Image: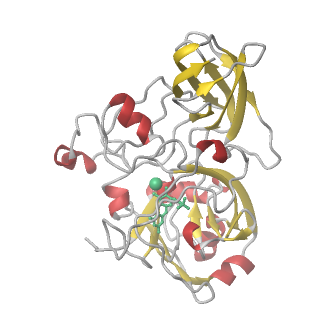
Amino acid sequence: MPELPEQPLNREPHLQDLVSKFLTPVDEGYDRNHGIHPNIDGSTHVVTIDGSVHRELKLLVKDLQNDFKQHDVVCALQCAGNRRHTMRTKIHEVQGIDWFDGAVMNCKWTGPKLRDVLERAGIALGDAEKQTAHIAFACYSTPCQEDTWYGASIPLSRALREDADVLLALKMNGQRLTVGHGYPVRVVTPGIAGARAVKWLDRITVQMKESENHYMQYDYKVLPPDATDSESAKKYWGTTPAIQAMPVNSTIALPTGGSSVERETDGYITVKGYAVPSGDDGPVVKVEVSADGGINWTDAELLSHQDEGKWSWKLWRCKLQIPSGSARTIYSRATDAAGNTQPKRSQWNLRGVCYNGYGEAADITVK
Ligand SMILES: Nc1nc2c(c(=O)[nH]1)N[C@H]1C(S)=C(S)[C@@H](COP(=O)(O)O)O[C@H]1N2
Ligand SMILES: [Mo]
């Protein structure tokens, strides 16, 4: 495996800062890297489109900008390991970075739709093949900890759907992409795990197999519960599907677990958080909060924002009546437009991915 000269940058913001803005500022979102950042010259960088296409394309960044209609998409981009800390502390130890609830950001991305670029190349597959084919994304510019390159794939059919809004993003919140978030071009796959949103994109391939990259085949999968360590996981990697859609989720940013809060004169406390929908099933239409372990639920107020859409997160807040005392737990539960809702606890898996049990602020002292 590649020896990297330094540690990859991995960090998440404080949750209260994160939910203070609908659009996450470029330098305030989480960073997730399996290698170190490459140093790419955006004026000469080429994205190759190849595989089962009629015309192989080599596009400069300026071609992506000038030759195709530019689209804006506001979406939540979330690491599949978001909330791993809750899974490992409430259920059982898992492998992976100890993400709390902040490995998600809600940004506005701008660039051409992948389907328009693929249309220019022409898909050289029959209709039946198009239904089962994959579109693979690769970055060869910088090695990773577990592989010499980074790659991922999504179903081709999804990339071809006008309403799936898969973008080759050149901008983030109206500004040129930063190196950390993929300059000069990254894939943005709304509703799909962040692991597929390949940064520093240099190749797009139409193929009949999934990406063979380590992070597609041997990571980012919800392994069955009897995969309890790396050894017992071995026989499951090949048969467990790679994560695509992320599940509906919500978390509580205020109050912070373990903190003390004073009740307002009316006996209420303010609870705040974010909620994200499941895959294609946005937006989130309801968030409820409970102060009694999930017996009674109070509807939270969903805040409205100008740029919101089915892929964006919902910020919410709630006035919750809660008795004073110590060791109180507050839960949150989101429901999306298709009726998907959070379970109290989601299934344990070795890699600690896709945790979407109730949002939880535990051990609160209410004065
Ligand atoms: N080339 C490349 N792309 C990548 C990664 C990476 O390590 N290398 N990490 C992926 C993962 S796991 C996530 S969650 C997102 C994180 O994006 P961000 O660092 O912009 O927050 O990028 C994805 N794209
Ligand atoms: Mo990730």
Location of residue 114 by image quarter: bottom right
Q: Quadrant of the N terminus?
A: bottom left
Q: Quadrant of the C terminus?
A: top right
Vertical comparison of 197 with 53: above or below: above
| Colour scheme in use | secondary structure
Vertical comparison of 207 with 102: above or below: below
Residue found at the far bottom of this picture: 44
Location of residue 253 by image quarter: top right
- Give the number of marks: 0
Decide if residue 333 is in sight here.
no
Vertical comparison of 2 with 262: above or below: below
Name the residue nearer the viewer: 42 or 60: 42
Vertical comparison of 209 with 318: above or below: below
Measured from the top left, where is residue 258 in percent x and y?
51, 29
Measured from the top left, where is residue 111 in percent x and y?
69, 68
Measured from the top left, where is residue 132 in percent x and y?
44, 55
Q: Is residue 209 left or right of residue 315?
A: left
Question: Residue at the location (50% across, 77% down)?
Answer: 202
Q: Is residue 171 left or right of residue 40?
A: right
Question: Residue at the location (67% across, 77% down)?
Answer: 64
Location of residue 313 by image quarter: top right
